[in-house]
Image (tube, helix red, strand yellow):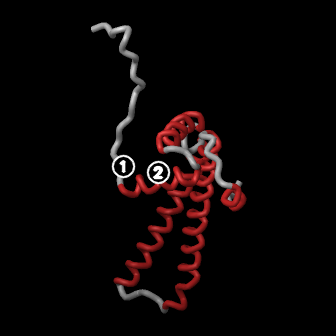
């Protein structure tokens, strides 16, 4: 059926349902960037394509390596628990180096993943031209 010349073409629309948490986050973005909801969403859609995938090939390799370390930590914990169940556990004081080492590995993994995600968030905001207020921008990592 042909459109009437008098009927203007409507722009495509998006209607979506958000969880309460996502709605709060969208409201925070609106307040933070001083833009209407629709403009925040439009900019993020455009920027997500321009910025590319969240993980670069290098970051993907890093995540694979980090996953390997997480599995190693899990195996170490499983071995400690098996020893405890068998009654072979040593005094807690003697296990401190093991727990400290596990904590250090988990902290390093957390730091590396945080760095990757913060960097991508910054890149996405730049691509979307969503600038932070000056007081917040100064405290954000580069």
- Look at the image and tell me in which quarter the N terminus lies: top left
Q: Residue 136 in the image: x percent, y percent?
A: 66, 59
Write down the quadrant of residue 80 in the picture. bottom left
Q: Nearer the viewer, residue 106 or 14?
A: 14
Report which residue position mark 2 lands on. Answer: 26
Q: Nearer the viewer, residue 72 or 136?
A: 136
- Look at the image and tell me in which quarter the C terminus lies: bottom right
Q: As displayed, is residue 134 above or below residue 101?
A: above
Q: Nearer the viewer, residue 120 or 90?
A: 120
**Dot 2 lies on which element?**
helix
Q: Nearer the viewer, residue 123 or 8?
A: 8
Distance CA(mark 1)–CA(mark 2): 9 Å
Write down the quadrant of residue 139 in the picture. bottom right
Q: Residue at x 47, y 51 (%)?
A: 26
Count how many numbered circles sit on residues in the image. Answer: 2
Marks 1,2: beta carbons within 8 A: yes
Q: Residue 54 in the image: x percent, y percent?
A: 55, 44
Q: Residue 58 in the image: x percent, y percent?
A: 62, 45
Q: Residues within 10 Å of mark 2 (few under 14, many from 20)?
A: some
Give the farthest residue toward the left.
Answer: 1
Report which residue position mark 1 lands on. Answer: 18
First in sequence: mark 1 or mark 2?
1
Give the farthest residue toward the front.
Answer: 6
Q: Residues within 10 Å of mark 1 (few under 14, many from 20)?
A: few
**Dot 1 lies on which element?**
loop
Q: Residue 120 in the image: x percent, y percent?
A: 60, 48
> Which mark is on residue 53?
none
Q: Residue at x 56, y 64 (%)?
A: 110
């Amino acid at each position: 059926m042909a459109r009437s010349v008098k009927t203007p073409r409507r722009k495509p629309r998006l209607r979506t349902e958000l969880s309460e948490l996502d709605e709060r986050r969208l409201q925070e973005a609106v307040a933070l960037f001083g833009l209407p909801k629709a403009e925040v969403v439009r900019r993020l859609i455009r920027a997500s394509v321009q910025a590319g995938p969240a993980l670069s090939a290098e970051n993907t390799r890093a995540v694979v390596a980090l996953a390997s370390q997480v599995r190693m930590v899990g195996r170490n914990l499983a071995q400690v628990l098996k020893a405890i169940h068998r009654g072979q556990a040593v005094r807690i004081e003697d296990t401190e180096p093991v727990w400290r080492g596990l904590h250090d590995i988990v902290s390093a993994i957390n730091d590396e993943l945080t760095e990757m995600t913060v960097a991508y968030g910054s890149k996405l905001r730049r691509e979307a031209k969503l600038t932070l207020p000056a007081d917040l921008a100064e405290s954000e990592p580069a």
